Image (cartoon, rainbow, N blue to C red):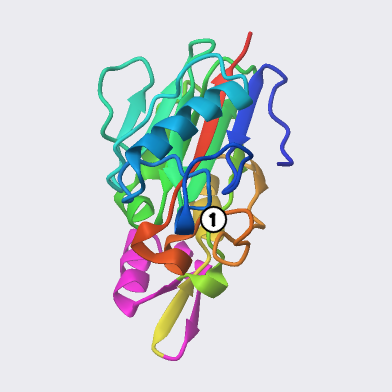
């Protein structure tokens, strides 16, 4: 990943395959989600491998993601939401994706970080806005993890209309092909972040659907697709 976050902030997006992973079949071997139909013992093994292989300082805070606009503090007992932030050292914020856009954020001083799960439904529901509102300042650094490209993200006219109702400027994130629309989820996120006063962004050039050796993709693999994890934490 190419980004320019403070040295004391660590980011990690997990691969589809990792030596020692226990998942089988369409799950690659390093699925980290418990809700996809994968063998739960394999997922538990992979979550332990995640900690040991990447030398994580703690167990990540796993969320029950619901395509909402809920942003949680990693120290809270709540787990249902789609974004999480922390100001505490060695506390790991995490979301999981398989086409949706993971958005990493840090303030300039590296004292507050977080990550959001932003699929098209979450974007419509305002997850980006609620995520950014949890930060004490707006001079933030943003990095986009891997998501599905516009070529492979086909949606109906009703989705296009909902985005334009949210903000007319979002129309430029769509390309119409026949009766269908293709959404550039990276561009939609950039527009919303720009509206919030954020200018410093990196990433946004990967495609989960096409890069099958690297990423899980729900649109490519179907309901039994595994999930990557996207983690961020403060070290010192």
Q: Quadrant of the C terminus?
A: top right
| Residue that badge 1 annotates | 147
Residue 177 part of the magenta-drawn span: yes
Q: Depth check: 27 or 227 in front?
A: 27
Does dot 1 land on a helix, a strand or a loop?
loop
Q: Position of residue 155 (x, y in %)?
A: 38, 74
Q: Position of residue 208 (x, y in %)?
A: 56, 59
Q: Depth check: 161 or 215 in front?
A: 215
The answer to whether residue 133 of the structure is visible from this angle is no
Picture residue at 40% right of the left edge, 31% below the top: 44
Residue neighbourhood size for the residue with mark 1, other residues' Cα within 10 Å, grouped as few (<14), some (14–19), many (≥20): many
The vertical placement of 151 against 206, above or below, is below
Q: Depth check: 10 or 62 in front?
A: 62
Picture residue at 59% right of the left edge, 36% below the top: 20
Q: How many labels were placed on the picture?
A: 1
Picture residue at 46% right of the left edge, 59% below the top: 26
Picture residue at 58% right of the left edge, 51% below the top: 146
Determine the image quadrant of residue 163.
bottom left
The answer to whether residue 20 of the structure is visible from this angle is yes
Q: Depth check: 67 or 202 in front?
A: 67
Q: Position of residue 37 (x, y in %)?
A: 31, 51
Q: Quadrant of the N terminus?
A: top right
Q: Position of residue 161 (x, y in %)?
A: 32, 72
Determine the image quadrant of residue 159.
bottom left
Bounds of the magenta segment: 154-178
Would you say the magenta stretch is mainly helix, strand or loop?
helix
The vertical placement of 229 against 124, above or below, is above
């Amino acid at each position: 990943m190419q980004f320019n976050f403070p040295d004391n902030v660590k980011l990690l997006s997990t691969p589809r395959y990792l030596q020692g992973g226990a998942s089988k079949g369409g799950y690659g071997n390093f699925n980290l989600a418990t809700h996809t139909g994968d063998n739960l013992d394999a997922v538990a093994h992979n979550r332990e491998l995640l900690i040991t292989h990447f030398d994580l300082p703690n167990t990540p805070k796993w969320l029950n993601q619901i395509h909402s606009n809920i942003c949680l503090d990693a120290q809270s007992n709540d787990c249902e939401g789609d974004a999480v932030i922390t100001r505490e050292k060695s506390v790991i914020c995490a979301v999981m994706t398989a086409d949706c856009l993971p958005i990493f954020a840090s303030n300039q001083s590296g004292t507050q970080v977080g990550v959001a799960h932003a699929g098209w439904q979450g974007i419509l529901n305002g997850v980006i806005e609620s995520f950014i509102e949890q930060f004490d300042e707006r001079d933030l650094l943003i990095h986009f993890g891997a998501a599905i490209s516009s070529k492979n993200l086909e949606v109906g006219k009703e989705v296009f209309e909902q985005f334009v109702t949210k903000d007319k400027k979002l129309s430029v994130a769509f390309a119409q092909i026949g009766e269908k629309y293709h959404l550039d989820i990276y561009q939609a996120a950039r527009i919303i972040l720009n509206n919030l006063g954020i200018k410093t962004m990196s990433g946004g050039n990967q495609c989960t659907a096409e890069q099958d050796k690297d990423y899980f993709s729900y649109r490519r693999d179907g309901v039994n697709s595994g999930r990557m994890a996207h983690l961020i934490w403060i070290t010192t």
